[in-house]
Image (spheres, rainbow, N blue to C red):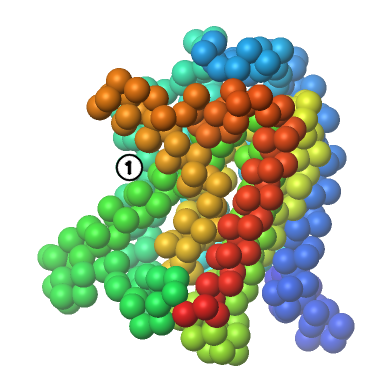
Amino acid sequence: MLYYLFYEQLFPAISPFRVFSYITVRTAFAGFTALLLGLLLGPWLIRRLQAFQIGQHIREDGPASHQYKAGTPTMGGLLINLSIIVPTLLWSNLTNPYVWLALLALTGFGAIGFLDDISKIRGERSLGLTARGKIGLQILMTLVIVAALAWLYARGDYNPQLVFPFFKTFRPSLVIESLTANPWTFPAAFSLLFVFLFFVLVGASNAVNLTDGLDGLAIGLMIISGGALTALCYVAGHAEIATYLDIPRVPLAAELTIFCGALVGASLAFLWYNAHPAEIFMGDVGSLALGGAMGMVAVLIGQAILLLFVGGVFVAEALSVILQVGSYKLRGKRIFLMAPLHHHFEKLGWDESRVIVRFWIAGLIWALLALSTLKLR
């Protein structure tokens, strides 16, 4: 909106407004707007959640040191989502379909998380939607996104190539090209994309959800991952830098830089209130939305595999749960003292703040490694 006003309308008459055509300037403004919006609305939302008695239920089998957190306002993800959506709408070029796809993933997975949170609150327990219900909604959301990508592909606005770190020329397509010529087989051409996208979006959203167990842990890691994605989007959308690094240029990805900048700003604002001891928790409406948005951005720029590095700690947290459950079902033995991984270290005697900061450091190392792979190929 402001992009249209400042650049499209005022620039022809007032030349200094040309600055708003620069992605870097609008990304900075989007990040600052998200930060300011989150900081200003945070206290109001906390009071409203307290008034409606929307508090967190703590799992009974979790660390005993967490029981005092019961009743802390949850569903703070509403604040995060709003603080991302508003600056994105203000500072990005809204004719760019990638912006709308990122917002669709954010709000779509956020809506699933919202339903999950409401189920927990009404049931007064730490469990929300059934696994079958949640997966069904996630499948539906993935189908909607795949349909949008198929439309963009038909227009020539989506490149389904997948970039692999450390490999220059290995770029398989997620669309079965031989089936795209016939209108009857055109939907089937995107079956591989659907399966891949489902695993990326659901995996990313659930990984962030599993990591959200300590004050500030998940949102701090999102700041780091969001910063790395901001750089990746800028590089993918910049003709000269993309050519220099020999990575596929994605012209429409440039505007995603603004979305990621807003994500980082909103996450910083939420960390202000979520830092230990937390005044508010993000809930599933926040964690599922952030994970879905992160996965969507990575897919759009062709760097979904690199997301394993960008969100390295998120991956480790999810794998710890998978390994723990698998080991217990197959062998009757547990690998970790408790899963997800952050609880394992708490059981080892690490206090909460130490686990959080050290996981942040690990997340930063993974993100830097991800950025280094752009040249190490």
Name the residue located 55 percent from the left edge and 65 percent from the top edge: 370
> Which residue position holds label 1?
139
State whether residue 363 is above or below residue 209.
below
Q: Is mark 1 on a helix, strand or loop?
A: helix
Identify which amino acid the numbered label 1 is placed on. Ile
> Residue 193 appears in which quarter of the rendering?
bottom left
Could you tell me residue 346's position as x and y percent? 62, 26
Q: Which of 161 and 85 is in front in this view?
A: 161
Name the residue at 75% across, 40% down. Answer: 271
Relative to 339, does residue 151 appear above or below in the rendering?
A: below
The N terminus appears in which quarter of the rendering? bottom right
**Nearer the observer, 69 or 281:** 69
Q: Position of 363 compared to 15: left or right?
A: left
- The residue that appears at 76% across and 47% down in the rendered structure is 268
Within-10-Å neighbours for mark 1: few <14, some 14–19, many 20+: some
Residue 319 in percent (x, y) is at: 42, 41
